[in-house]
Structure formats: structure tokens, C-alpha cells
Image (cartoon, rainbow, N blue to C red):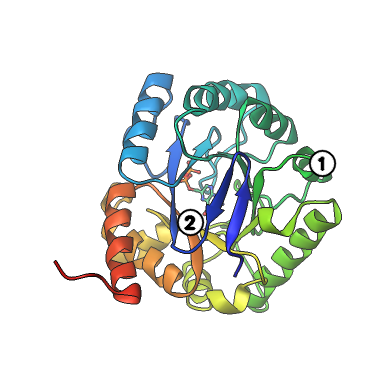
């Protein structure tokens, strides 16, 4: 795996799993009891996550839960840009979760370090928006689009199909001049996948991997956790951590989570097992 990730103002070592804290600035996120639409609430949540050990923050102004409707660019920008500006000096890389090339450009100008595109930079304008910058990019797999993606997802072989898609998108980014050490890949759990497909993909994460790109994975509080535990989104912390550790065991470099403190503890214990600890 790559030793580090070029991420805007930062170069992130990938010698331990990193935690990306989810900062949804949307009124309709599936996963949160009290979503942060007001700037002050969002900033407080961001600072809490940093204090708890978040290595990056992922700011999203458009919900992508199954069935969600698109948000106009101006509205998404109004939600996201003030948050970037307010957190620019917070000391952690800022990721922006958007598929809109116009907002990608504005976010980069405002100081974003990573562009997380759930549509995998399929839009050539999105590639053009990031090509000349030094931001990191997260290339995610999704079958279909959020409004309809869960209707009847179909694969020949979920791991190999996801891999083929990611390989093609990474090649397109590389051809446009995006350096190898700027790219993260993401299998897109819950995005056009049945629960059986989600779990098969997690189990076979190594087979879906496009070398040498590091994995970012997002399983936190998702329906795949609820499917197995029977719990509502805010009660899915323990299940989410089990899935995150399963991904880390299969090589995930970055985990995108809502519960930073709990995930931090779990990863610390994980690392102690893997690398050992000092007595005393
Ligand atoms: N999942 C969500 C949103 N963005 N980005 C990446 N790279 N990987 C993911 O798995 C991923 C993502 C959906 O989760 P969330 O942001 O918690 O919910 P919502 O979109 O409803 O706000």
C-alpha cells in the first residue's frame, strides 16, 4: 500500500488506520438524531470530533441516503462553504462530500483538502475540477443513483464488478494528471447493494482492491448494520465498529464514522494487538 496520501495542505501517513469524522450539514441525514444545519451546531460537533481523535472531517451538504432527492448547488454551497471557512485552521484535513463540479471548485478555493465524490468522478467536469489541485480524491462505487439505487441492484460478481469500476475511474483520473498518491478508493457500502452484497463485498474487500490505492470505507450506522442487529441508526455504534474492524483487518486505511471516540478506542486496542504495547 502507499505509505502516505497527498491531501491538500497535508500529507497523511497511512501507517495506522485513520478516522474520518462525518459532519453532515443536512436536515435529512439518515444516521443522526439531531442533524446539524446551523453553523454553530456543526462547528461544535466538528470540534468535538477533532478532540475525540478524528484525523479528517468529511463535510456533506446533501443527503445521499436511499431515496434522497438532489439539492440545488447554491443550497449545498450555502451549507458547506461557511463550515470549511470556519474550520480551515482547525488542524485536520477537510473533505467535502459532493458530486457537483462547481462546488468542488468553490470548496477547494475555500480550503478543502479532499474531494469525496460518491459518483466516482464519472462526470468529466468533476475530474477537471480536481485535476489541477493538490487535493486528495475519494473515488466511490455506486450502482445507479441515490433516488433509485436500492430497487434491484445486480452484479455478476460484486467484488470484481466494483473493482473493475474503480480501476476504470482511477485510470481516468490518472490520465487527467491526478497523481497516484492523491487517490483513495471506496467500495460504497449501501450504494446500490443488497445486504447480502454489502457483506460479501466487506468479506472480499481484498479481492475488490485496485492496487496501490488505499481503501476508505463507510459502514457507520448504515442499514447493513441495522439488518443484522435490528437496531435504529443511533444504536448501531457497536455493530458499526465491528464492521469497521473487519474492514481494517482487510486493509482499510481510512474509516468514515459518526462515532469518533468509540472508533478511536477500538482502533487503539486493535493496533495494540497488531503492534504490541509497552508494559507500565
Ligand atoms: N456514505 C455516505 C455518504 N458519503 N462517502 C464515501 N466516500 N463513502 C461512504 O460510504 C459514504 C459517503 C452516507 O452516509 P451518511 O453521510 O452518514 O448519510 P447521509 O448521506 O444520509 O447524510
Across and down, in percent, residue 193 comes to: 56, 64
Residue at the location (67% across, 53% down)?
182
Looking at this view, is 256 or 234 the one in front? Answer: 256
Looking at this view, is 165 or 5 the one in front? Answer: 5
**Disc 2 residue crowd, few under 14, some 14–19, many 20+, Cα 10 Å:** many
**Residue at mark 1:** 128
Looking at this view, is 217 or 114 the one in front? Answer: 114
Residue at the location (34% across, 68% down)?
271
Q: Is residue 231 visible?
A: no
Q: Is residue 278 above or below residue 121?
A: below
Residue at the location (50% across, 76% down)?
200
Q: Is residue 102 left or right of residue 192?
A: right
Measure how far apart labels 1 and 2 are at the Cα level. Answer: 25 Å
Across and down, in percent, residue 173 comes to: 78, 54
Q: Is residue 33 left or right of residue 205?
A: left
**Disc 1 residue crowd, few under 14, some 14–19, many 20+, Cα 10 Å:** some
Q: Secondary structure at mark 2?
A: loop
- Does mark 2 have its CB less than 8 Å from ligand 1? yes
Q: Are marks 1 and 2 in contact (CB under 8 Å)?
A: no
Q: Secondary structure at mark 1?
A: helix
> Which quadrant holds the N terminus?
bottom right
Q: Is residue 234 left or right of residue 161?
A: left
Residue 218, disc: 2
Amino acid at each position: 500500500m502507499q505509505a502516505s496520501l497527498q491531501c491538500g495542505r497535508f500529507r497523511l501517513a497511512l501507517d495506522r488506520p485513520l478516522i474520518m469524522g462525518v459532519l453532515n450539514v443536512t436536515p435529512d441525514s439518515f444516521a443522526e438524531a439531531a442533524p446539524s444545519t446551523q453553523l454553530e451546531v456543526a462547528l461544535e460537533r466538528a470540534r468535538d470530533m477533532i478532540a475525540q481523535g478524528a484525523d479528517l472531517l468529511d463535510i456533506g451538504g446533501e443527503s445521499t441516503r436511499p431515496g434522497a432527492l438532489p439539492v440545488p448547488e447554491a443550497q449545498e454551497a450555502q451549507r458547506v462553504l461557511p463550515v470549511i471557512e470556519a474550520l480551515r485552521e482547525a488542524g485536520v484535513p477537510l473533505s467535502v462530500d459532493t458530486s457537483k463540479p462547481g462546488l468542488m471548485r468553490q470548496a477547494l478555493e475555500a480550503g478543502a483538502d479532499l474531494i469525496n465524490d460518491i459518483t466516482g468522478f464519472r462526470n468529466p467536469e468533476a475530474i477537471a475540477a480536481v485535476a489541477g489541485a493538490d487535493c486528495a480524491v475519494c473515488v466511490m462505487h455506486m450502482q445507479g443513483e441515490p433516488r433509485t439505487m436500492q430497487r434491484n441492484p445486480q452484479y455478476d460478481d460484486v467484488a470484481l464488478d466494483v473493482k473493475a469500476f474503480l480501476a476504470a475511474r482511477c485510470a481516468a483520473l490518472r490520465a487527467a494528471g491526478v497523481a497516484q498518491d492523491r487517490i483513495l478508493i471506496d467500495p460504497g457500502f449501501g450504494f446500490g447493494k443488497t445486504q447480502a452484497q454489502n457483506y460479501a463485498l466487506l468479506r472480499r474487500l481484498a479481492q475488490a482492491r485496485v492496487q496501490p490505492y488505499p481503501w476508505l470505507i463507510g459502514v457507520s450506522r448504515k442499514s447493513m448494520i441495522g439488518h443484522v442487529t435490528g437496531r435504529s441508526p443511533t444504536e448501531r455504534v457497536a455493530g458499526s465498529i465491528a464492521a469497521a474492524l473487519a474492514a481494517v483487518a482487510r486493509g482499510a486505511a481510512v474509516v468514515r464514522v459518526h462515532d469518533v471516540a468509540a472508533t478511536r478506542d477500538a482502533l487503539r486496542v486493535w493496533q495494540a494487538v497488531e503492534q504490541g504495547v509497552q508494559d507500565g
